[in-house]
Image: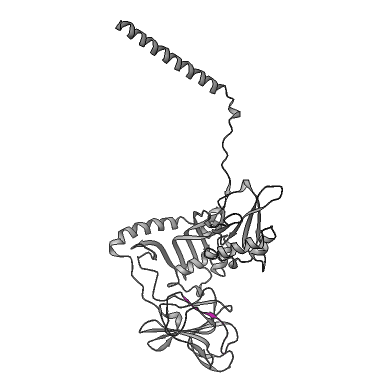
Amino acid sequence: MLKFIRLTFVGLGLFIAFSQFSCSSKAEKRVEQIPQDTIVPVKEPVLKYGLPVDSFDVEYGKVRNNQYLSQILNEKGVSMVTIDKIARKSRSIFDVRKIKSGEPYAIFSSRDSVPTAKYFVYENSAVDYTVFELFDTLGIIQGSKEVRTEMRTAQGVVETSLWNSMVDNGQDPMLALELSDIFAWTIDFFAIQQGDRFRVIYDEMFVDSVPIGIGEIYAVQFDHYGEENYAFLFDQDDRLDYFDDKGQSLRKAFLKAPLQFSRISSRFSKSRMHPVLRIRRPHQGVDYAAAKGTPVMSIGDGTVIARAYQKNGGGNYVKIKHNSVYTTTYMHLSGFGKGVSTGARVKQGQVIGYVGATGIATGPHLDFRVQKNGSYVDPLTVKAPPVEPVKEENMERYVVLRDSMMNELQKIKWAEDLDVLVSK
């Protein structure tokens, strides 16, 4: 009897196994019989500003002169009541009164027989944008586009100016400003001469394949008056800074000049013919000719000891005491920087005023003066001591980075070397 039961269970197991195999085989055959061209892949939605553009009609535009958000939206059928609610609700996120002419925007509308505006997107910058929902809760969302960076190299020889050299070589001219900032303490960029040259390794930033600016600059060689000047970006004590090939910091106590990209119209002199008074008298500073309104920066940290108007020629001026040795004066200003008042502390590079022609002047310029121990000295000859170099415990790591970057710089061929190779 037990043997019969065991045989019964074995038979039943075989029957079930065969049935499962048979069903599985039929299922596989059914799957195999489905034509491959009938399988439709799931299409990923195309997103812009986080919104599926395929689901809307999208209209792109730019804010016109004297155009407000209310005008843009009202033209698209959005009621003034809704616009008012959006304006009041968005104040803590983005003040719609700050919408500027020339900035791009996009309107996402439904694809109904009567299209309805659903979203308004304003681009605050090349990266940041604000999305305004035009329905239900009237939400306001801020977002950022993905920024992609690519490492670049560049080289050039100065013919007329560093800026023009960048343009002539098809490079972002803003790179010139970045280099002037890096070498602000060591190279007088107002004295750049023909034949000076540079090569640099840096990041360029892109949004939607459009270049939007310069990222990190990793290494630079700038030959000025035949002297090689190097800058290498190095992380010391969790702070990125630039050091030369010997590990000395490129930051010093003072900037080389109090404004960017101008020209020297008059130098320090013990006997200069005054352009207005037509008499000879000492000129105890350097005149930088620049457009009215050009920002003027403090060349170092210090305390404002005077912000006033000089009746006998200097016009609006700011005087800053940096330490027990140096004091600087900035004259003929058209206006003063925010927060600049007598007794205020200012930082190196802080805007303390704007170029003007107040006082006795033939045109807009900055009269910049430096006093050392109470006596006027030529600002162009002031040498400031360097700040902390690469520390001894970090030197081995720095040397590895420096040598690696130096090797990469040497791979960037100068234009004249490339010309020789081509001619051969």
> Image point 60% across, 84% down: which residue?
363
Position of the N terminus, as image quadrant, is: top left
The single residue placed furthest to the right in the displayed view is 113
Q: Quadrant of residue 165?
A: bottom right
368 up-or-down from 216: above or below: below
> Image point 58% across, 87% down: which residue?
361
Image mark count = 0
| Residue sitting nearer the eye, 4 or 45 | 4
| Residue sitting nearer the eye, 314 or 26 | 26
Position of residue 392 in the picture relative to residue 221 (left or right): left
Per the rendered image, the range of residues in magenta is: 348-362
Q: Quadrant of residue 407?
A: bottom left
Residue 138: give x, y in percent of width and height: 58, 57
Residue 3: give x, y in percent of width and height: 31, 6
333 up-or-down from 207: above or below: below
249 up-or-down from 141: above or below: below
Position of residue 32 in the picture relative to residue 9 (left or right): right
Residue 417: give x, y in percent of width and height: 51, 58
> Image point 45% across, 62% down: which residue?
220
Q: How is the image coloured?
A: one colour
Position of residue 389 in the picture relative to residue 177 (left or right): left
Residue 361 belongs to the span the image colors magenta: yes
| Residue sitting nearer the eye, 330 or 284 | 330
> Image point 46% across, 60% down: which residue?
216
Residue 230: give x, y in percent of width and height: 42, 65
